[in-house]
Image: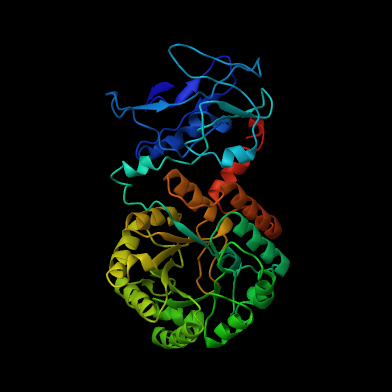
Amino acid sequence: MLSVKASDKVLWSKNLSFCTFIPIMLNLEEPSVIDKLSRFCGDKVKMFSSNPCVIRESGTGTGHCWLEGSSLHPSKSSNYEYTEEAYPWRRQMKNVSWGDFFNCTPASTSRKHRVFGSVPDTCYLPDRSYSSHCNNKCTRDNKLLRSIPEYVQIVEVGPRDGLQNEKEIVPTAVKVQLIKLLVSSGLPIVEATSFVSPKRVPQLADAKDVMEAIRTVEGARFPVLTPNLKGFEAAVAAGAKEVAIFVSASESFSKSNINCSIEDSLIRYRDVAVAARKLSIPVRGYVSCVVGCPEEGVVSPSKVAYVAKELHDMGCYEVSLGDTIGVGTPGTVIPMLEDVIDVVPIDNLAVHFHDTYGQALSNILASLQMGITTVDSSVSGLGGCPYAKGATGNVATEDVVYMLNGLGVKTNVDLRKLLSAGDFICQHLGRKSGSKTAIALSRIRFPASKL
């Protein structure tokens, strides 16, 4: 175990051709540490962990952290152990599977070091590096994080919201396989498709075929989007057991998106809600443009609260609040949530953030601190709205899971399997993942000399 000051972030070995950078983040402070990467280590930086470091309690001050293990090792031996009285820790090199890496938990990790490949081109992984898993105690004892829930439910919207904006038609078989891979990762809810007009959204014209193909898939719920009573009836005929409806908090966006006013859309969806109630089919509601509109600009929180209450009153078991164009920050999201929570129970609310300005994770964290326990996301950050110019993809499910793991929040999602699902759809689409977590973890699959 090594004790280092917060300012001592680089360890250098004269016998080695690389330096090891140890980023230390104290309570989300020192973000500038990342800027020093190129100056100190260039492209030879090795490992980074989102785990919060543990402050020593024996009076060393906040300038010290205890770091377990070491990232430096001699290049002459591939199997050795090292013990020194001053540093009572043990190193042992061995090969491990990626399954061990992705599924490690705080309770099961040891101080042994793990190595991928052969020396000297080794990607050297201390057990506690690169695992975002955090003991739940680290959030419960922190006054800034103790309000975060112990469990967060993730609603995966990739197969619908993620693919609807794709210009090239994705084959039905690919959509079905994506859904199966997402379910196998442990995601409890996967929004499968949408029963909209094929003329409006050609990508989802195969909704009936998708529903037929996943009819026997177990382990998750598969809500589908229905824009009107006709769409609802088609969804029920195709075997849908849960539906979703959507209303905009922006008058202009409502007219451009569904060609009617907010009030007219509410009337339309009341008919859907009544029909669903008769068949005992749960209805989830979406509110779009909750902080900003591509045409109107800033959206008043009071408008969002009004629409959310209308959806809740008509029978929606949950109302998801969507930042459709991704312009929100905690400074605009928190006031919006405060207004909505006044009229809709927080247990009946979810959040849905696009990551246009890179604010999605910070908005999610702020929402969790306010008591939100359900988060929408899209594998590989897929998505965008055909009727919202400038809107990029949803927040990536991989990034959300990684952050929640780091906060000690349970999701029951296997990150390794989730990454496989993301790889699958990105390979088909011919593009790299929009998930920073997926990109970062993909890099450490290669020898260190290629990083």
Depth order, front residue of 357/151: 151
| Position of 181 relative to 50 (above/below) | below
Give how far across and how far down residue 286 sits, in percent: 45, 73
Q: Give me the residue at 51% from left, 83% from top.
A: 279
Depth order, front residue of 274/263: 274
Q: Give me the residue at 39% from left, 26% from top.
A: 66
Give how far across and how far down residue 20 sits, in percent: 52, 26
Question: Residue 152's quadrant in the figure?
Answer: bottom left
Extreme top residue here?
85
Depth order, front residue of 275/307: 275
Q: Residue 355: in sight, yes or no? A: no
Give how far across and how far down residue 315 sits, in percent: 40, 79
Question: Residue 253's quadrant in the figure?
Answer: bottom left
Give how far across and how far down residue 416 sits, in percent: 60, 47
- The N terminus - image quarter: top left
The answer to whether 232 appears left or right of 87 in the picture is: right
Q: Give me the residue at 33% from left, 76% from top.
A: 303
